[in-house]
């Protein structure tokens, strides 16, 4: 099966900082992949290039047979790639229900109301339906952000640090809801994460970034135990072999 | 249905005014209607998060288009003039909107002001259009039906009311549903709108067109009320009046522009009688007071009364 | 050849006037994020104050040359009295609000100032021709020009240089630049942002009043001279990029030259030409020529 998303030779630098140095990655359909790496390693840059927010200096990205480089974020969204944000991007003066309704009405022609009800149920947001998005607790704002992204009938869902800013006891619960909804909708999920417990629990594959390049790619168990990953991403002290 | 009831009440009221009220009141009602329609357009823009400081541009275009029909092309049908006013404004907006829809906040506000002042400058320098004196217009028929002298304004009042009600209902319908939510979405978070697959640029453009056409229609109506057009109709102070009325009314209800316009014109009439030299100062002070104490406009007062009732 | 020379000179004179008008506006926006519509009112106030002060000076039989100093004094008085009054008395309570709301506030202030001027000075026009006529004329390519225009160019240059030096070479200036860059961080590291706002507004107001005071001898001073000025100044500032002093200078030169060429070869299009320049620049660079870079939002 051909990969649903394929990137080749991506280069991106901001002045002297190399955020992407010849990055090539393939993603298969119906998988859950986690991108990890220290801040500035290039994971969010990768996300931003896929979604059209940034343009790579060189390289190409294919999705469903289309070249993504050069397309606007709006065009890329309409192709079926949607994303959630580190800081939830919501319509703060509108209610949760209205937020979802906007998303559904843009995404689909028939019965956005029903789709909204389904989304509220899927993401367990029914009790917040009437509240204004601006006054919600952070975890619920995160959920809403993802719910709006999933609403666009997406085929590929990109999550940018879905549990950042969420209290430790809520993280797993929120990811359970998100992953359950994604699985039910049959979308491929790529999520950027700093919390290795979340990564270990929910990812089927882990890609580790460092200094614009990839230093690990494979099963969570393997990658999270690799020496380079432990040193540069997780931050553990790795005992040196004595000379 | 509440909307239908209000619409009928308005129409009944305007017919009553037309039949019973003295000329000066009919005239004032027409002006209130004209300005209310312009402010309705401002409301559309404000829902999208934009404030235009230059609706005088389209108000002036609408007025002059109507007047030119009479003056230049000897068309003296009021209905044609009203349509011409809206159409001319819409045509210009179709062009200017392409540029302006890229901007937000103060850029949008000041650019719209700049364009209205361009029109003002052009009108003042144009001897063919009467320069600062302007010129008159006469409407002798409405939809082909000849009007008897002395009843013109009454007819225009009722016609204007019908149009205002229709416009208000259309805006109400449009903004009560998906388009209204989209516009609010643009106001709240453009980034999100883009990443949901819609185009904030297009949404702003369309709303700009609607607001401008409404302002053009209002201009034509005002021209018919006064019987005269001059460059002052595009001057920045009139754009400022529209903004003031919009803030006075707030954006909660489509009735607000008209109610606020009525209050404004009444106050203006009183001020011109007793304190003409401090009119602008009073406006300025009132604006500051509203911004500081009633940011939602006077309409929020009615909400407070309803809650306490 | 003489045609081009006169067009160029006229352009530079107009550009000098525009720069004096716009420098204060762009400075206040850059530091405080307020588009000060009352700028036009301060301009008018400066003009009226200049007429009164210089008029009183000359009326008292004092040496005519001193009337120039009176112009400057009028500007400083307006800027340093009305400026702080506005900032401390009104604006400082409004800082949290959105930019458009602040524009509405300054707009309201402008309306109030218009009537205050009318109440104080009446609606008849005031004339102050002496400072303009006194230095006499000089000849450029056979065309007589008032020496006053050279004064104007000189003032613009001096003002620009002083502002640039103050901003980029002094400690206070660097603090100002820090606040322009990021208000929150500046507050966090202990910069007294409140005092900087006050100082900036006073300087900006003085510049506006200076523009009015220097213009007063060349026109009939009437209520309403403030309006066209605010729109023109905004156009210049937008071309250069809001908050950029160099941008204001470049924008002033561009607009000045284009306008003077238009006035000579196609007079009806004068106002049009200015905004056409603005529209063209904005189409190419939506935020103006030297607009500040925006940081990544997501």
Image (tube, coloured by chain):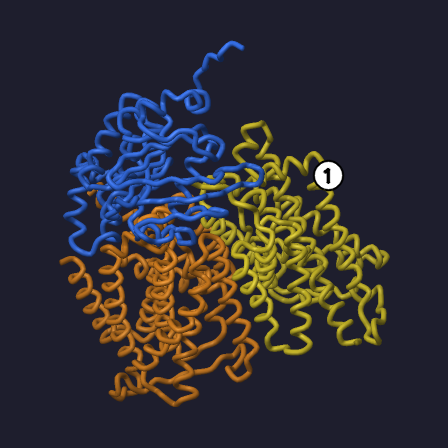
Chain colours: A blue, B orange, C yellow
On-image quarter of the C terminus of chain A = top right
Q: For mark 1, what is the residue?
A: C169
- The secondary structure type at the circle numbered 1 is helix
Residue C48 seen: no
Vertical side of B309 occupied by C288: above or below = below
Q: Residue at x 49, y 49 (%)?
A: C105
Residue C281 seen: yes
State the residue in front, A184 or A97.
A184
Q: How many marks?
A: 1
Q: Residue at x 32, y 87 (%)?
A: B140
Q: Position of residue B58 (x, y in %)?
A: 42, 69
Vertical side of B214 occupied by C35: above or below = above
State the residue in front, C231 or B103.
B103
State the residue in front, C192 or A190.
A190
Quadrant location of residue C129? bottom right
Q: Position of residue C225 (x, y in %)?
A: 61, 63
Image position of C81 (left or right of B117): right
Q: Residue at x 53, y 47 (%)?
A: C34
Disc 1 chain ID: C
Q: Residue at x 52, y 82 (%)?
A: B130
Residue furthest toward the top?
A: A242
Image position of A13 (left or right of B307): right
């Amino acid at each position: 099966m051909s990969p649903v998303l394929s990137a080749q030779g991506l280069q991106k630098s901001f002045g002297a900082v190399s955020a992407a140095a010849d990055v090539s990655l393939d993603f298969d359909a119906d998988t859950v992949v986690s991108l990890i790496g220290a801040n500035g390693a290039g994971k969010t840059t990768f996300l931003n290039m896929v979604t059209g927010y940034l343009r790579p200096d060189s390289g190409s990205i294919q999705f469903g047979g289309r070249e993504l480089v050069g397309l606007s974020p709006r065009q890329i969204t309409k192709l079926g790639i949607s994303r959630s944000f580190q800081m939830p991007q919501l319509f703060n003066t509108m209610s949760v229900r209205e937020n979802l309704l906007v998303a559904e009405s843009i995404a689909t022609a028939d019965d956005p109301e029903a789709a909204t009800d389904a989304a509220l149920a899927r993401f367990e947001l029914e009790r917040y339906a009437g509240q204004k998005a601006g006054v919600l607790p952070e975890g619920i704002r995160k959920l809403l952000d993802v719910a709006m992204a999933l609403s666009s009938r997406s085929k590929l869902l990109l999550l940018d640090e879905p549990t950042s800013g969420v209290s430790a006891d809520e993280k797993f619960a929120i990811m359970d809801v998100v992953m359950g909804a994604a699985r039910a909708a049959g979308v491929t999920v790529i999520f950027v994460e700093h919390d290795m417990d979340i990564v270990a629990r929910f990812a089927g594959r882990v890609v580790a970034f460092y200094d614009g390049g990839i230093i690990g790619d494979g099963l969570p168990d393997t990658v999270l135990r690799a020496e380079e990953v432990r040193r540069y991403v997780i931050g553990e002290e790795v005992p040196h072999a004595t000379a | 249905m509440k909307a239908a009831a209000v619409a009928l009440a308005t129409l009944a009221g305007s017919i009553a005014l037309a039949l019973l009220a003295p000329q000066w009141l009919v005239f004032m009602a027409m002006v209130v209607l004209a300005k209310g329609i312009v402010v309705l357009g401002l409301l559309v823009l404000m829902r999208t998060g934009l404030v235009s400081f230059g609706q005088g541009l389209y108000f002036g275009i609408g007025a002059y288009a109507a007047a030119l029909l009479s003056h230049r092309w000897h068309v003296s049908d009021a209905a044609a003039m009203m349509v011409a006013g809206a159409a001319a404004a819409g045509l210009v907006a179709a062009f200017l909107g392409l540029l302006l829809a890229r901007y937000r906040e103060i850029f949008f506000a000041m650019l719209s002001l700049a364009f209205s002042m361009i029109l003002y400058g052009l009108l003042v320098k144009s001897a063919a259009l009467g320069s600062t004196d302007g010129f008159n217009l006469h409407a002798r028929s409405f939809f082909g039906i000849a009007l008897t002298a002395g009843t013109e304004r009454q007819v225009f009042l009722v016609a204007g009311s019908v149009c205002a009600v229709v416009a208000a209902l259309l805006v109400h319908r449009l903004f009560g549903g998906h388009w209204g939510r989209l516009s609010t979405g643009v106001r709240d978070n453009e980034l999100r709108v883009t990443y949901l697959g819609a185009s904030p640029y297009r949404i702003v453009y369309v709303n700009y067109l609607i607001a401008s056409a409404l302002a053009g229609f209002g201009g034509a109506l005002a021209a018919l009320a006064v019987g005269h057009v001059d460059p002052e109709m595009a001057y920045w102070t009139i754009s400022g009046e529209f903004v003031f009325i919009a803030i006075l009314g707030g954006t909660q209800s489509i009735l607000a522009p008209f109610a606020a316009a009525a209050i404004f014109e009444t106050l203006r009439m009183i001020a011109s009688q007793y304190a003409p030299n401090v009119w602008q100062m009073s406006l300025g002070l009132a604006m500051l007071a509203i911004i500081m104490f009633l940011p939602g406009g006077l309409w929020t007062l009615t909400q407070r009364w309803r809650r306490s009732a | 050849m003489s045609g081009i020379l006169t067009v160029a000179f006229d352009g530079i004179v107009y550009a000098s006037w525009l720069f004096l008008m716009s420098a204060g506006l762009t400075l206040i926006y850059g530091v405080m994020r307020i588009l000060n519509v009352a700028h036009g009112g301060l301009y008018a106030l400066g003009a009226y104050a200049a007429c009164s002060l210089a008029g009183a000076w000359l009326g008292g039989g004092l040496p005519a040359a001193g009337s120039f100093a009176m112009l400057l004094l009028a500007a400083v008085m307006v800027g340093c009295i009305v400026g702080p009054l506005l900032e401390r008395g009104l604006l400082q309570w409004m800082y949290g609000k959105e930019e458009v709301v602040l524009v509405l506030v300054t707009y309201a202030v402008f309306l109030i100032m218009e009537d205050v001027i009318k109440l104080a000075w009446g609606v008849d026009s005031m004339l102050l021709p002496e400072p303009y006529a006194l230095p006499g004329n000089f000849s450029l390519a056979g065309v007589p020009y008032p020496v006053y225009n050279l004064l104007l160019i000189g003032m613009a240059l001096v003002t620009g240089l002083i502002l640039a030096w103050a901003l980029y070479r002094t400690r206070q200036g660097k603090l100002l630049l820090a606040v322009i860059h990021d208000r929150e961080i500046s507050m966090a590291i202990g910069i007294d942002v409140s005092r900087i706002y006050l100082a900036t507004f006073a300087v900006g107001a003085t510049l506006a009043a200076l523009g009015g005071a220097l213009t007063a001898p060349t026109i009939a001073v009437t209520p309403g001279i403030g309006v066209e000025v605010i729109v023109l100044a905004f156009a210049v500032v937008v071309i250069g990029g809001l908050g950029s002093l160099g941008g204001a200078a470049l924008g002033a030169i561009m607009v000045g030259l284009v306008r003077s060429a238009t006035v000579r070869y196609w007079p009806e299009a004068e106002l049009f030409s200015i905004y056409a320049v603005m529209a063209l620049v904005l189409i190419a660079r939506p935020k103006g020529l030297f607009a500040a870079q925006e940081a990544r939002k997501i």
